[in-house]
Image (tube, rainbow, N blue to C red):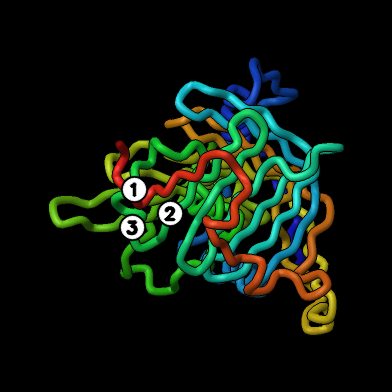
Amino acid sequence: MRRRRGLINGAASVLSAMVFGGCAQTSATIEPYYGPTETIDQLVPEINSNVQPLSTLWAKGDFKATIVDHGHTTNVSGTAYLMHARPQEMLFIGDADVVGEVFRMGCGPDKYWVTVKGDTDTCWWGTYANLDRADERAIPVRPDLVEAVLGLDAMDTDLNRQPCPVMRFNNDQHAYMIVWNVKLPDRWVVQKEIWYDLVTKLPRLVNLFDANGRVVLSAYLSDDKPVDMGAAASQSSDAPMVATTYRLFFPDSGSKLQLHLTDIELQRHGHPNNENFAFDPDTVDVKHVINLDEPAH
């Protein structure tokens, strides 16, 4: 069944407007929904049917970013190019008119990195092997968290396997709210929370948390469009849908990233491929290269 666009998530829309630029004016208040809802085991196959065909993704659009590094702010904007491949590979390139590339962010099989040109002229990078001990405050935008939003995984059908999902329904916002929990040696903690639209079953809000329950990334997703599946289109008449507008906020640093995608395809001219996600810190052309695996001095 082809998904329909659902009602706007009021709470997420208002909060997004507050975070990304001032007062919010809502055109209408949606009425609470008290009709029938689905159980989590009914919801999981619907969510997964949209996610599973997207083993790769190529997209183009525009972006605007405010990068805050220990109080120093750099604003960059321009054309965005996005590539993603499962399980965790991502490349985001931001080009500005005249000056060329101003922003690059990626995740490979073993490394993650962010490069900001201009006055900042810095590359931050680290390895997944040492991610748990890296200082999260040392990097203004965490690529691993951005990848977790842009490449939302299918849900595990074993609902007792950690991280364990727990669902509640928000009547006021017409949303299924699923929270994933994991057990640490001394307690249970929440990893992430995703709000899924009542009608479309597509994500509207993603919150990612640290081990102390603090939000490390909030992402607001909207404007769903079908993905151009190319040669794979003959396999299904119902193309998967993805959000084309993303508003990301990193509370710890104050950095923000807004992304609007206009061209969305499964692949374009053989991209993405393994070479797109390769990274060598010795070849980065910036003044400052910060290895997040090394202790801060």
Q: Do the residues labelled 2 and 1 touch (CB within 8 Å)?
A: yes
In front here: 282 or 133?
Answer: 282
- Looking at the rendered structure, the kind of residue marked 3 is Asn
Residue for badge 2 = 126
Distance between mark 1 and mark 3 Cα atoms: 6 Å
Residue 278 left/right relative to 245 = left
In front here: 212 or 147?
Answer: 147
The number of callouts visible is: 3
Residue 18 left/right relative to 252 = right
Look at the picture and state if 35 lies above or below 270. above
In front here: 227 or 285?
Answer: 285
- Looking at the rendered structure, the kind of residue marked 1 is Ala
Question: What SS does tag 1 mark?
Answer: loop
In the rendered image, residue 31, in percent from the top left (x then y), is placed at 63, 33
Question: What SS does tag 2 mark?
Answer: strand
Q: Are marks 2 and 3 in contact (CB under 8 Å)?
A: yes
Distance between mark 2 and mark 1 Cα atoms: 8 Å
Residue for point 53% across, 52% down: 113
Residue 3: quarter of image: bottom right
In the rendered image, residue 42, in percent from the top left (x then y), is placed at 51, 68
Distance between mark 2 and mark 3 Cα atoms: 7 Å
- Which numbered disc covers residue 40? none
Q: State which tag comes first along the sequence, 2 or 1.
A: 2
- Which numbered disc covers residue 134? 1
